[in-house]
Image (cartoon, rainbow, N blue to C red):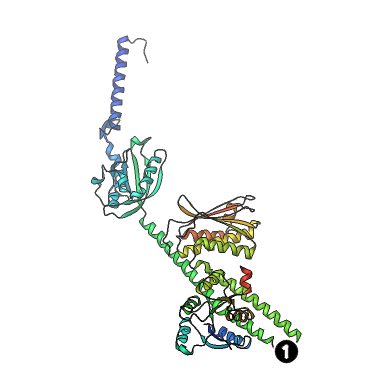
């Protein structure tokens, strides 16, 4: 079973995503971090026991942004692919996320699309929400 | 009148006497005009009287010396011939030392050409000009000058009245500062509300949508599924409204991008939301604007484009960013219905939105010019103040 690190600061949103990942995606949620700092701390604590197949990262986080976190994860843990998740569909967020090293961008209001995006990235591909493709 | 009995000699004598009296009168007038006499003696019915010319000038001299404005007289080449004490105070120099100096040298270098032009204009009509003097300490003194001829031409002398407008300038600067503070506070509040909408309300709506989707996995009746679909559709609409409201309150594009990029984004939104095709011509990107001025200009242009949608009756508008005579300008124009500017601006209800835009721009030193006629489209130009440092 694939393990997901979820980085989401909104409590209700995080609970909903955990439920979706477990029931719809059949994924294991390794941890839920409320900030970029918490996520990095958790990752460094795992050391040799680190078993994370993908990081699902919210764009908007307190203090350090999700985009900056993706950049740091790519530097320190290049084996962990990152998928951005957000309510914001603005093109500049998508571009900046991909430039930081994210393997895709999915929108929160379509959870089937979120699960689909995770599966694509786990298989080695990149993924953009269908709504983003339509807006472009 | 020549009497019949007068001899030729008598006539000659009379003529000579008249000539002498005329010459004496002309000499007296010349002496008075050239300030060579202070008084003259007249023989009146009640006896001999001495009339002093200087006495009639005393009230006027006192007025000039005591008034709160600086008074200077110049000779045609701009040299100071006289100045009152108040002017000396403004320049912080003795009046005696100022006499014989060029008035132009008392003006800050970058405005001297402006004064020269006004000085030349005064030859044909009185001129008013705001200018900056430089006092003996090197400090700047903003003044309003009234320049006018003392007679039919410059040879009569040129009078310059200087009114210190330092306090007025300080008050204007204070108002601008307060207006900027108000704009800043408003932008911050809009941003805060935008954040709440996005970071909290929108997230909750997403979560509710997802939870509703879970219910679809349960065996429910067809009617219940239909209701669930309707609820989900309503929620999607709510999410869209929240998202649009969040964006409109605090457009992301204004946080870090320049005005030209913001206008590009605005054009896209106007097309997407209202079907208005906005052509953007950026002859100058106007990147120097600080964030609050940028936000105010953005909001103003957005309002003006809304007016095109609501009133112009055409699906097309143009926004131009440029410099005119060195001043940054943004123009919104359309070929729509147009309107009677005087009639609309005179009606505070009809012009409510326009007047608010105009007032807010004016508080930050901008000037809005409206040109429109019924049937001939509308052109609205916003002139910005001189360069302000970007932050």
Foreground pick, B56 / B136: B136
Q: Quadrant of the C terminus of chain B?
A: bottom left
Q: Position of residue B104 (x, y in %)?
A: 32, 45
Q: Which residue is mark 1?
A: B219
Q: Position of residue B5 (x, y in %)?
A: 35, 9
Q: Is residue B218 above or below residue B307?
A: below
Q: Which residue is located at x 41 percent, y 38 percent?
A: B124
Using the rendered view, name the quadrant where residue B165 is placed: bottom left
Disc 1 element? loop
Q: Quadrant of the N terminus of chain B?
A: top left
Residue B349 in view here: no
| Residue closest to the far right | B222
Q: Position of residue B86 (x, y in %)?
A: 29, 50
Foreground pick, B379 / A119: A119
Q: Position of residue A108 (x, y in %)?
A: 59, 78
Using the rendered view, name the quadrant where residue B207 is placed: bottom right
- As drawn, is B6 to the left or to the right of B368? left
Q: Which residue is located at x 45 percent, y 88 percent?
A: A45
Q: Check the residue under mark 1 and report the chain it is in.
A: B
- As drawn, is B153 to the left or to the right of B321? left
Q: Residues within 10 Å of mark 1 (few under 14, many from 20)?
A: few
Residue B24 in view here: yes
Number of numbered discs on residues: 1
Foreground pick, A85 / B9: A85
């Amino acid at each position: 079973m694939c393990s997901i690190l979820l980085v989401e600061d909104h409590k209700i949103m995080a609970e909903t995503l955990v439920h979706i990942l477990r029931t719809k995606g059949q994924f294991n949620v390794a941890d839920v971090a409320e900030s970029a700092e918490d996520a990095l701390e958790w990752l460094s604590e795992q050391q040799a026991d680190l078993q994370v197949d993908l990081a699902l990262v919210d764009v908007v986080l307190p203090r350090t942004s999700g985009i900056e976190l993706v950049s740091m994860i790519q530097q320190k843990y290049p084996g962990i692919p990152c998928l951005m998740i957000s309510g914001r569909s603005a093109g500049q967020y998508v571009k900046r996320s991909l430039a930081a090293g994210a393997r895709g961008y999915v929108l929160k209001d379509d959870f089937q699309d979120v699960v689909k995006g995770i599966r694509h990235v786990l298989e080695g591909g990149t993924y953009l929400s269908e709504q983003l493709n339509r807006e472009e | 009148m020549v009497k019949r009995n007068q001899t030729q000699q008598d006539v000659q004598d009379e003529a000579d006497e008249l000539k002498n009296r005329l010459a004496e009168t002309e000499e007296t007038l010349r002496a008075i005009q050239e300030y060579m006499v202070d008084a003259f003696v007249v023989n009146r019915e009640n006896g001999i009287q001495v009339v002093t010319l200087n006495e009639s000038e005393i009230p006027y001299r006192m007025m000039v010396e005591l008034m709160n404005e600086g008074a200077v007289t110049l000779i045609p080449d701009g040299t100071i011939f006289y100045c009152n004490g108040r002017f000396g105070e403004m320049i912080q120099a003795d009046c005696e030392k100022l006499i014989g100096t060029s008035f132009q040298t008392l003006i800050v270098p970058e405005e001297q050409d402006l004064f020269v032009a006004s000085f030349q204009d005064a030859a044909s009509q009185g001129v008013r000009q705001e200018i900056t003097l430089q006092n003996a300490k090197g400090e700047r003194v903003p003044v309003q000058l009234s320049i006018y001829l003392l007679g039919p031409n410059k040879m009569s002398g040129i009078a310059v009245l200087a009114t210190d407008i330092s306090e007025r300038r300080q008050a204007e600067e204070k108002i601008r500062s307060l207006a900027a503070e108000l704009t800043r506070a408003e932008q911050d509040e809009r941003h805060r509300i935008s954040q709440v909408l996005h970071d909290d309300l929108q997230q909750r709506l997403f979560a509710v949508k997802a939870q509703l989707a879970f219910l679809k996995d349960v065996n429910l009746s067809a009617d219940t599924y239909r209701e669930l679909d309707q609820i989900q559709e309503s929620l999607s609409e709510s999410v869209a409204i929240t998202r649009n409201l969040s964006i409109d309150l605090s457009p992301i594009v204004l946080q870090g991008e320049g005005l030209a990029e913001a206008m590009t984004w605005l054009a896209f939104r106007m097309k997407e939301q209202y079907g208005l095709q906005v052509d953007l011509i950026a002859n100058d990107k106007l990147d120097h604007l600080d964030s609050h001025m940028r936000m105010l200009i953005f909001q103003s242009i957005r309002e003006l484009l809304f007016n095109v949608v609501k009133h112009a009756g055409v699906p097309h508008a143009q926004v131009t960013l440029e410099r005119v005579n060195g001043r940054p300008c943004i123009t919104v124009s359309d070929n729509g219905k147009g309107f009677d500017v005087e009639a609309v601006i005179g009606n505070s209800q009809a012009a409510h939105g326009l007047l608010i835009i105009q007032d807010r721009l004016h508080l930050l030193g901008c000037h809005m010019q409206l040109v429109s006629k019924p049937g001939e489209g509308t052109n609205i130009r916003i002139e910005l103040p001189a360069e302000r440092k970007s932050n």
